Amino acid sequence: MTDHPILFIPGPVEVEAELREIMSTPLVGHRSKPFMALAQQLSADLQQLFQSSGPGFFDNCPATAIMEAGIRNLVEERVLHLTCGAFGERWAKISEACGRQAESLQVDWGEAVSLEQLRNKLAESPPFEAVCITHCETSTGLISPLAAMAETIRELSPESLILVDAVTTLGGAELRFAEWGLDLAFAGTQKCLALPPGLAVYAVSERATKRSQGMAGRGFLLDFAAAPERFAAGATPATPCVPLVYALARQLERIRDEGLENRWRRHLELRSKTVSWVKAQGMQMFLPADSRSPTVSTIRYGDRDPEELVAKARSAGFVLAKGYGKLREETFRIGHMGDHPVSRLEELLAALAN
């Protein structure tokens, strides 16, 4: 037991004591030379995290704001959304709310949009200005084959920008922005980066930056065309959450020390431990093996009493998440993302065992 319940939910996630302590340090002005130098360093560190060829950016907002900014900066009329769960559906609603012609290639929750379906959709339609992909659908725990999807889009519709919700994959699952030819990817700090909510981080390709330059009504705060010059000077567009920026800087150091690919492998091991436990308990995973995210597992209750599972977790000092939306009554979720060591997950699973 610790001094607080340990979070194994799909966000916000557990924050290590060192990072919590950093956020209690005294404030400095965000236009001071030390902080502006830190913003410049963070931009370079985020480039490494995204594996992008250009700088990364951050701002005070939820990742949902970058969903909207992506549409306002990069789409004038037509956009395609690949939807297989609640958050892909949300992005399509955002596009509609922004007045765009949003078209969805939709499959049932628990299914992935296939490459064949994507090819057929791109072939039957005039070119879309952008295609929006949810890398990991947090509502179901499904991870899409992003690299193959991006390759298909570049082959069949090279003028379409590729926009990616990496909210529950950045820092927890393989993501190679430049190599895979992505144009926008974003996440919030409260998922695999294992920090409190409050900042969104994002990367933008050179061609997306150029698209943004010619887009009317793209706004001021999340102006993709202005971001490179702003961050090159260490000048955030508005006052950021300074304590959280400190913590992000330290967390990116910790990720670098662990090794990004090692971090990806640790998340795969966390998933493997979870799947083995589910089988040993006579329960079932919600998704087939080839579409399970390394960061969040959705599990069918089966004969287990959901309230009993939650109570067992709580008595052992852990917090679980129930299923999301239409899956709430038949599943629960374990968010094994962030800084959790395998040993901590094993403690949770032992406490939940029959």
Image (cartoon, helix red, strand yellow):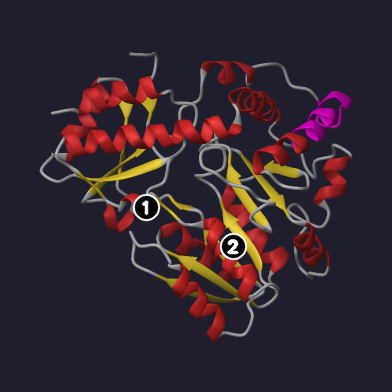
Near-viewer residue (148 or 136): 148
Near-viewer residue (3 or 189): 189
Near-viewer residue (246 or 343): 343
Magenta residues span 29-42
Q: Is residue 166 magenta?
A: no
Quarter of the figure with residue 5: top left
Q: Tell me where residue 103 appears, x and y as whole percent.
A: 52, 76
The reply, left or right, for residue 64 in relation to residue 333 is right
Q: Is residue 35 magenta?
A: yes
The reply, left or right, for residue 9 in relation to residue 96 is left
Q: Which residue does the numbered mark 2 point to in the structure image? A: 150
Residue drawn at point x = 79 percent, y = 58 percent: 206
Q: Which quadrant is the N terminus positioned in? A: top left
Q: Are marks 2 and 1 in contact (CB under 8 Å)?
A: no
Residue drawn at point x = 69 percent, y = 30 percent: 245
Q: Tell me where residue 46 appears, x and y as whole percent.
A: 70, 38
Q: Which residue does the numbered mark 1 point to in the structure image? A: 290
